[in-house]
Amino acid sequence: MRVATGIGYDRHRLVAGRPLVIGGVRIESDLGLDGHSDADVLAHAVTDAILGACALGDIGEHFPDTDPRYAGVDSIALLRAAGQLAARAGFALTHVDATVLLETPKLAPVREAMRANLAAALELELAQVSVKATRGEGMGFVGQREGAAALAVATVQSS
Ligand code: MG
């Protein structure tokens, strides 16, 4: 059995007039994330971590932001597709850990809902998915509310 890990990172700009969707959860906020899809920064980072663990390229290659099919798309659907790509390539996903970087609002109230959405999309148990959140403490693009970011690590097994 071989074990491999992959890393994912994503960031999107925070703007007025867009919904804030993170980990498939719509969160009440004055600013939302801008992007071609729903700009779900957490779903995108986890998608890239899974593709990375399987050496299957990256999210931009599989779901290009120039493709009208992905305009406004629910990024949880892209995450599910990445999980299926991994399975077809012979990899079993065993764990995902992620950190969301957002200044405000606090993500603690929706953390479990985000975990549940990721786990469901990837057909994992809740115990195999971890979501954490941290703030920018007023510093940099996260702290200044210019944008949000997410980091993720995925672990896979193959025989
Ligand atoms: Mg993205």
Image (cartoon, rainbow, N blue to C red):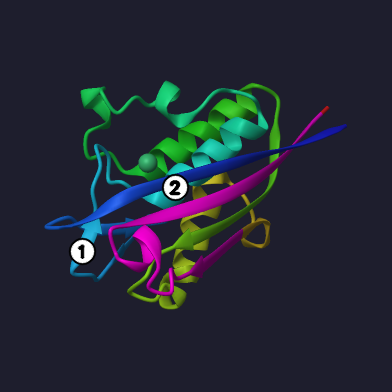
Q: Nearer the viewer, residue 134 or 74?
A: 134
Q: Give the foreground label among 2 and 1.
A: 1
Name the quadrant containing residue 126: bottom right
Q: Pick the quarter of the image with the C terminus.
A: top right
Is residue 83 part of the magenta span, yes or no?
A: no
Mark 1: C-beta under 8 Å from nearest atom of ligand 1: no
Tell me the SS state at disc 1. Answer: strand
Q: Which quadrant of the picture is home to ligand 1? A: top left
Q: Residue furthest front?
A: 139
What residue is shown at x 63% (from left), y 47% (from top)? 153
Task: Assess whether residue 148 is covered by the magenta stretch.
Answer: yes
- Which residue lies under the disc numbered 2? 43
Spatial CA distance of label 2 from label 1 is 18 Å
Would you identify the image quadrant in which residue 25 lies? bottom left
Q: Position of residue 113 (x, y in %)?
A: 45, 66
Q: Which mark is residue 150?
A: none
Quarter where residue 137 is shown: bottom left
What's under tag 1, amino acid-wise?
A: Leu
Q: Which mark is residue 31?
A: 1
- The one nearer the camera, 133 or 109, is 133
Q: Secondary structure at mark 2?
A: helix
The region drawn magenta spans 130-158
Q: Residue reaching furthest left?
A: 17
- The number of discs equals 2
